[in-house]
Amino acid sequence: MGQLGLHVDVHAPISALSIGEQQLVELCRVLLEEPRLLILDEPNSALNERETKRLFEVLRRLRSGGITMLYVSHRLEEVFAIADRVTITRNGHDVLTKSTSDLTISEVIEGMIGTQARELFPPPLPNQTTATLARLNVSGLSGQELAGISFGVTSGEVVGLAGLEGSGVSTLLGMLFGTQKAKSGEVRYPDMKGLPRNPTEAARRGICLVPADRRHQGLMLDKSILFNISNVVVGALNTGSPWFGHRSAQTRAQRQIDKLRIKTKSSNTLANQLSGGNQQKVVVGKWLEIAPNVILLEDPTRGVDVGAKREIYELIRQMSADGRIVLFSSTELTELIGLCDRVMVLYRGRLAGTVSGADIENRILLHLINTGEMPALAAKSRAV
């Protein structure tokens, strides 16, 4: 635990730990065995930057001690930071194996999706609705680490949320969905009502949240695709029958399987038998069944392969074109740069700044995320 920088009570139940802490406990258990071959499948998918750095230090020390490692990851920058060689697979076939020194990130993406990296992010789609623009307004929202957050989002926009762990991004999304309580402030949704009291009320008002931790908060892993896709409709909506009907559930499931291109042989397949990308599509699909008008996405491509990421990006574009309000948080700056019309950066609970247009780029976002201050050059260009 000391090697990995994990400081928790060893007698605490695992359920009381955060996702990142749980993942570090898993690694501790493996390292105690002193294996000759260590296979790591997305070992840092739930770790923050500091925890990932400590993990990499341990892995490098193990490598110097002669341990062989197979490291599976979709965070390509980190693959290049830790791996000696890279093998790319696509659709079950080996595409290529090369030393990292002989590859670029763009070449890896092209190998994974079969097209060039610049095509990963689809362009904005034209507005496909003639309805009056809807708006979400947040004014002076405070509570927990949040302090006086104010902003507005109009339907048809994709607005990004960025910030370090603990900056308040997750708390903000939780308050907007009704899983966390605000202390003060005012919020107005398109239905002209305030914050939902709980997730059930949120669902009934067309507000949805796709959580970062899909395995614990987004899915019932021991249930079928069919059951998962129906659970919001049957459990939250107050229209139609309150009972689970297999025929209507089958219709819903097949609709989303076809629409989202969920790779499965049957709607009766259990969620825990799907890949990460297809699990995430099931989470999205269950919410699409209630036709939400406010969509909150918390790191929706975490632990998802590049091909599935592109499909999720296309879906986000479609949601925006359909006139929905989309708030999208991500730990990957490339996603925020490639998809968002604006990016709001939270720093220690406050809204540190909002960037748009040409200002949505790595240097400005990194500076704002890590310091809470707008770089002088970006601030000057915005003033002009």
Image (cartoon, rainbow, N blue to C red):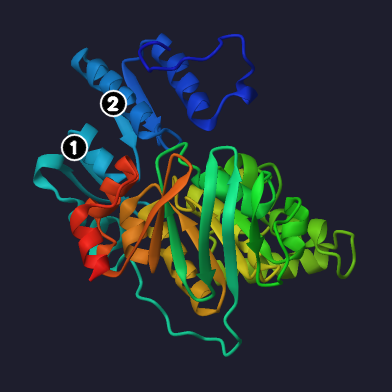
Residue 74 higher or lower than 310, as above or below: above
Q: Is residue 116 visible?
A: no
Q: Residues within 10 Å of mark 2 (few under 14, many from 20)?
A: some
Residue 67, image x, y percentages: 26, 17
Q: Tell me where residue 379 appears, x and y as whole percent.
A: 25, 59
Quadrant in the rendering for residue 181: top right
* Residue beneath the point at 67% across and 59% down: 267
Instruction: Say above or below: 78 vs 50.
Output: below
For this rendering, which residue is in front, 345 or 44? 345
Q: Nearer the viewer, residue 293 or 267?
A: 293
**Dot 1 corresponds to which residue?**
85
Residue 122 shows in the view: yes
Per the image, label 1 sits on a secondary structure element best described as strand
Determine which quarter of the picture holds residue 255: bottom right
Q: Amino acid at mark 1?
A: Arg
Q: Quadrant of residue 264?
A: bottom right
Q: Quadrant of the image for the C terminus?
A: bottom left
Residue 43, horizontal then vertical, whole percent? 40, 31
Tell me the SS state at disc 2: helix
Circle 2 sits on which residue? Answer: 56
- x 81%, y 67%: residue: 247
